Every structure is written in C-alpha cells, then in structure tokens.
Image: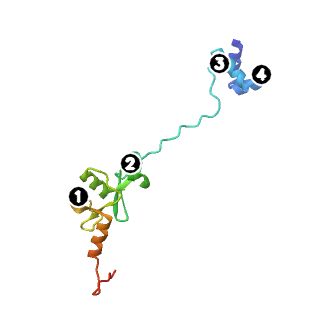
Amino acid sequence: MNNLAELYEQAGSLLALSRELGVSYSTLRYRLEKQGVEVKSKGYKAPRKKQIAKAENHHNWKGGQYKTSGYIYEYAPWHPDSEKRKGYVEQHRLVMENHIGRKLNPDELVHHINEETTDNRIENLQLMTRPEHIRYHKEKAPRDELGRFTS
C-alpha cells in the first residue's frame, strides 16, 4: 500500500484523494495513518484568540487610579468590595483599612475631616459609624433662628 502514500502526495489533500478513489474521508485517513504517513490536519485552523490585556498590561493603564464623583478609586482586585466596581475600591477606605489593620465593617465609614474627598492622608481620615457621621454633619449644618436647616 505504499502506492496510497504516493497518490496522497500527488492529490495534495485527503479530501481530493477520497473523492478520486470513491472512498470515505475517515477510512482513507485511517489507512494512511496506519501506514505511518503524516496526514495534514483538516480544515481551517483559526488563529488563537488574543489574551485580553488587563491592569498594567492594558494600553490605556493610568497607574491603577481614577477619580469620579469626587472620590479616588484604586485598583485592588483582591479586595472583597472590589467586585461591584471591576476591581476598584475607594482609596480612603483602603488607607483606613491599612492603618487599622483590618477590613472595615459594613456599618463603618471613613470621614474626611477637611471635607476634601481627594485628600486621603491618614491625618485627614476619621473612622465613624453611620449614625455618628449623620450626627456630625447635622451639628455643622446651617440653621435659621428657629433651628431649622437652611439648606
């Protein structure tokens, strides 16, 4: 059956040879492989998909920080709270967690003492509960002569 290998070389493809001989493609492939003939892989081989670049490898990477709605967000994909923001967490929360050595509880928040939300120095941050934070801002809010909030 060395003749079969020569016919395969002349035909150029397994499909062409199977049509010429009137034999099924799979039978012809089996017989050629049994003889030790290297059969070309069939069909179109699509190029491998490119790996999507993330974080530092992305062309538009700006150092892992962005600012929106007054707060600075930092890339921290390992953080439990980062899932809802595609790997980003508010930077002031990360600074406070690093300072106290634990993750913040759900009822805790970080207050900016000088009210500048982009100033995330530990000296400017204060850990509070939600009720404490509301009370703090209510005490500072402007009131009229009857004690009603003006704004």
Measured in 3D between alpha carbons, the distance from the residue under mark 2 to the one under mark 1, in whole angstroms, is: 22 Å
Nearest to N terminus: mark 4 or mark 1: 4
Nearest-to-viewer mark from 4 and 1? 1
Q: Quadrant of residue 108?
A: bottom left
In-front residue for pair 30/40: 30
Q: Nearer the viewer, residue 99 or 120?
A: 99
Q: Position of residue 71 (x, y in %)?
A: 34, 62
Can you tell which mark lies on residue 33?
3
Label 3: how many Cα within 10 Å (few below 14, some 14–19, many 20+): few
Q: Nearer the viewer, mark 1 or mark 3?
A: 1
Residue 4 x %, y %: 71, 16
Ranked by sequence position, the earlier of labels 2 and 1 is 2
Closest to the observer, 26 or 10 = 26
Image colouring: rainbow
Q: Provide the residue designation for mark 4.
A: 21
Give above or below for 114 relative to 85.
Answer: below
**Disc 1 versus disc 3: distance between alpha carbons?**
71 Å
- Classify mark 1: helix, strand or loop: helix
Could you tell me the amino acid type at mark 1?
A: Ile
Identify the disc placed on residue 77. Answer: 2
Disc number lying in front (2 or 4): 2
- Real-space Cα separation, disc 4 to disc 1, in angstroms: 82 Å
Q: Are marks 4 and 3 in contact (CB under 8 Å)?
A: no
Along the viewing direction, whichever of 83 and 61 lies nearer the viewer: 83
Quadrant of the image occupied by residue 28:
top right
Element type at mark 2: loop
Q: Which residue appears farthest toward the left when viewing the image?
A: 123
State the SS at label 3.
helix
Helix, strand, or loop for circle 4?
helix
Residue position marked by numbered label 1 in the rendering: 122
Q: Earlier in the sequence, mark 2 or mark 4?
A: 4
Determine the CA span between mark 3 and mark 2: 50 Å
